[in-house]
Image: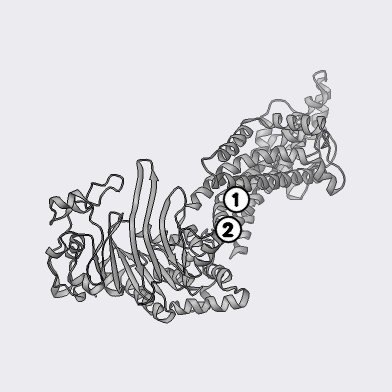
Amino acid sequence: MTAPHLSVRDLNVRIPTPGGVLHAVRGVNFDLMPGEVLGLVGESGSGKSVTLRSLIRLHRPPIQMTGTVEYGGQNLLAASDAKLRSVRGGQISMIFQEPMSALNPVLTVGEQIGENLREHKGLRGRAAQERAAELLDLTGIPSPRARLSDYPHQFSGGMRQRAMIAIALASEPQLLLADEPTTALDVTIQDQILRLLLRLREELHMSVILVTHDLGVVAQTCDRVAVMYGGRLVETAGVNDLFHAPKHAYTLGLLQSLPGAGEHRRPLQPIPGGPPDLRSLPPGCPFAPRCAYVTEACRTGEPPLLEVAPGRFSACIHYDELPALKSTLEEVGV
Amino acid sequence: MHSSYVIRRLLQIIPLFLAVMVVVFVLIHFIPGDPVSAILGDRATTENVARANRELGLDKPLIVQFGFFVNQVLHGNLGESINLKVPVLRLMLDRLPVTLFLDVYASVLGVVMAVPLAILAAVRRNTWVDSLIRAVFQVGLSLPGFYVALQLLTLLGARLGWFPIGGYGVTFGDHIYHMFLPALTLGLNLAAILVRTLRNSVIEVLTAEYVDFARAKGLRSRVIMTRHVLRNALIATVTLLGLNVGGLIGGAVITETVFAIPGVGKLMIDAIFGRDYPVIQGLTLVFAVLVSLVFLATDLIHARLDPRAELS
């Protein structure tokens, strides 16, 4: 078996707020295999984006990160600033949800690609220009050479996201962290961007961690899925397994809340209640207050994430009572 | 695109110029007193006053005087000082460079002090460093200019003897040396205004997502601070700086007086007390043009810094 590309152990993130410490990520463990596309799924506030940002230590004090993020034989959470800088952008790149706010409004797209090329590839001047134009071309931006001198506000939403991907890929990273890269885009553009990411992953042999709340996006792009709830991983599984037979009551709820498409259209079944308050979690399973399968045992201790079938992990003590869904990937609208 | 904008803005100075001519002419004739009684004093006889008024053309109806003034200005002649008997243009050419030098010097000192301190305060926000920087400038801002000027003069000039206590000097090096204290007086005030705004802008920009993106790209913190944070934070500050530098032209009267600097601020005050109409009118017109030019420059720099700004 090959060694994981990235290995996360006991990751905890604590965010001090006026109302008390918010324990946003609570003991997350996962491995990412080379070339894999891992989806990190959950509702708003589940800790998925916070987890993603921790992987390259992007949080600043007073936010605290503990645990280990092992990459290339090194714990990134304890690495020196210089080492971290060479990994950031160089080997692990990140793209953000809203390219309008993630791109610097006062620098041209060419300049923003250029600084990445200078920092990690040692390219300057003409060579950097040429490479930058290639990158824009690679991400499907028409007349790339002319667009290098444009500012982000002169791009359309979809083109802006392509430009951000071009910037992130300038250093030819081995791992791409994507934080809801298509949430701000309309559906047709979303589809183009996801296809682009999959194509680039093939061409550049990257692994990808994709944060999303959209199971349709997961079905379309991911090899494996990790579901987060209340700051913890509650289920991980291969994408087909997860959609056919969820092993956590929360995952089941998520899948049942999908409308389906075409002939598979069915009434929405929303999950009752709202996400838990991470400043005052109840003892036991954080999903218990909203769960249809809840028993007394769920409320007493928080169930650990255990291997319940080969390659499948769940933190639900009722995992084998959950119905298999007939849902197929087509149903999710793919 | 920029050049047509600049031309349009320059053309806009013309109506402004005409309006200023009317306003200043009307205003100075509203001030009680007149040049003749200022020159001759209260012992002058009626005949003396009448003759002097006739010589200066002040016995004509106001509308005629105004027509004469406009005619002169349109021929590039700002008239002659009543009290000094020197063409106003000559006076101005002597004095204006001094004031402009002081203003530029003060702006440079102000920016040089404000930018690093504002960044430091923003990066160390809500620590004692931040509090100290803000407190010092807050006090500086609330102290009147003449007080700061006198304190600097007493301490650094008279007691320690590091800087001359007045004058302007002859060579450029002389000017830098002689004008340091007055420029510092004005610069401190400017820095106090700038630090507040710039600190807040830097703090705001630091939370922007593009700063996180820049960090995720593995850029050095110095590069992030200058290319990404400062360039964005300066956008709001440049406008503020422009407004204040515009105000310094002709507004540095007290500082010029305390340090005995032969600038236009001092000239203006003397002219007002002496009711020297041509000097007041001429200076006001030149101030209006200069302030317009400073504002135009500010807008151009702003557009340069912020590509989203539309010049229209």
Residue lying at 54% horizontally and 78% vertically, measured from the top left: A131
In the image shown, does A11 or A307 lie closer to the viewer?
A307
| Residue bearing mark 1 | B238
x then y, percent, for residue A110: 54, 71
Here the colouring is one colour
Secondary structure under badge 1?
A: helix
Q: Chain of mark 1?
A: B
Q: Are marks 1 and 2 in contact (CB under 8 Å)?
A: yes
Q: Quadrant of the N terminus of chain A?
A: bottom left
x then y, percent, for residue A179: 38, 64
Q: Is residue B279 left or right of residue A109?
A: right
Question: Counting residues from the N terminus, which is met first, the one under dot 1 or under dot 2?
Answer: 1
| Residue bearing mark 2 | B305
Q: Is residue B178 left or right of residue A86?
A: right
Establish whether labels 1 and 2 are both on one chain: yes
In the image shown, does A128 or A25 lie closer to the viewer?
A25
Residue lying at 40% horizontally and 67% vertically, measured from the top left: A177
Rendered position, B68 above or below A47: above
Q: Is residue A183 left or right of residue B273?
A: left
Query: Does residue B102 appear in this view?
Result: yes
Secondary structure under badge 2?
A: helix
Q: Kindly indicate the quadrant of the structure image that contains residue A130.
A: bottom right
Which labelled disc corresponds to residue A101? none
**Which residue appears farthest toward the right when viewing the image?**
B170
Residue lying at 82% horizontally and 37% vertically, measured from the top left: B162
The amino acid on which the numbered mark 2 sits, given as a three-letter code, is Leu
